[in-house]
Image (tube, rainbow, N blue to C red):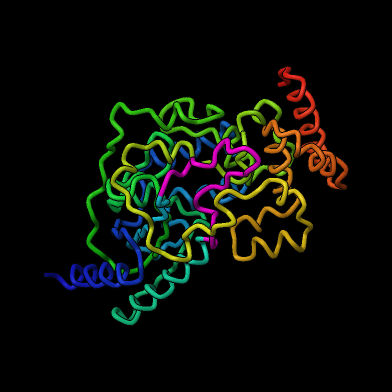
Amino acid sequence: MTPAAAMGDEIRAKATALGFDAVGFSEARLSPETGARLREFLAAGHHGEMGWLEARADERADPQVLWPEVRSVIALGMSYAPPGDALATVGMPGRGNVSVYARHRDYHDVIKGKLKHLAQFIVSRAPGGQVKVFVDTAPVMEKPLAQRAGLGWQGKHSNLVSRAHGSWLFLGEIFTTLDLPPDTPHADRCGTCARCMAACPTDAIPVPYRLEATRCISYLTIEHAGPIPVEFRRAMGNRIYGCDDCLAVCPWNRFAVAGREAKLAARADLEAPRLAELSRLDDAAFRALFAGSPIKRIGRDRFLRNVAIAIGNSGDAALRPEAERLSHEPDLVLAEAGDWAVAQLDVAATGAVLL
């Protein structure tokens, strides 16, 4: 065994001990086709308000533009597969549906801490080697790098799919100046399956492997700051933060077992939170409820905008006072969502249909 291969084995063992479920190595480069797809995505405006995708596109398309000294990428995955049906609370009257990934601690914090431990281990075992750690917040194309490192493949929904963990993998990377033996890139195993495309409530995946983010409920409820476009409000249902529909229907999920990281396990109060209780949160209560959660990042008003839409879709007349109160909020976007919810509930009470 070469020294580089032995080092790779040590890194895999340490990563597994730290709680990572998938580890792979790739050269620090991406194919020209990957960069071309990114530029097409941006040129079409599918990134919407996510200006950070465009601002550093050159670095995103080429790891060596981001860090010229990098030689290898260590791609790591951590399962967050739910123990039961991820969509069990979709459409549940009077309740909100929170994306599986956001039902407990912010995964960025959890994974970054483990990556730093692994980076320290690498430096201790290979003096002179340099490392940088990344978790979704830098211009790094995580999914193509993970595919090159053999962790899985980008499915037709554009997310990574693993034969062992389905669609439920958080990703992180360590860039290093070490030369590590690369793993074999993973082949695409989607075949003729298109369940993810059919499951999308807003038709945000019009063709395989291309996501139009500006139609995606995850984008609309998290990244989009203004009013939710009316054409998508009914399709949102009770999804108040993110959407798991395209992930949950993937047939490869049948091989996934529940994630083992306790800090990512769902909090009971976020599995099916009551819309009425959420609608009454002031800023201090919002911050307290979502301390350490990724939901805190979008702020109280944007979150309650989503809650108002869910209330309007509930058909529950008992929630009308909550919608009425939200319609008088000082934030104009939130107030407009409250007005819409009131109108929806009033029409639902008559048995009519209001789009």
For the question of whether residue 113 can be seen, the reply is yes
Q: Looking at this view, name the residue that lies furthest to the left.
A: 1
- Number of numbered discs overlaid on the protein picture: 0
Q: Is residue 257 left or right of residue 87?
A: left
Residue 149 x, y percent position in the rendering: 30, 53
Which residue is at 45% across, 65% downward? 111
Q: Is residue 219 left or right of residue 342?
A: left
Which residue is at 39% across, 29% downward? 195
Residue 134 x, y percent position in the rendering: 47, 62
Based on the picture, tell me whether residue 334 belongs to the magenta stretch. Answer: no
Foreground residue among 52 and 300: 300
Which residue is at 18% across, 67% downward? 5
Based on the picture, tell me whether residue 104 belongs to the magenta stretch. Answer: yes
Foreground residue among 345 and 205: 345
Residue 237 x, y percent position in the rendering: 62, 34
Foreground residue among 188 and 144: 188
Q: Quadrant of the C terminus?
A: top right
For the question of whether residue 48 can be seen, the reply is no
Q: Quadrant of residue 121?
A: bottom left
Q: Quadrant of residue 17?
A: bottom left
Boundaries of the magenta span: 84-106
Magenta-highlighted stretch: main secondary structure?
loop
Residue 92 x, y percent position in the rendering: 58, 38
Q: Is residue 319 left or right of residue 195?
A: right
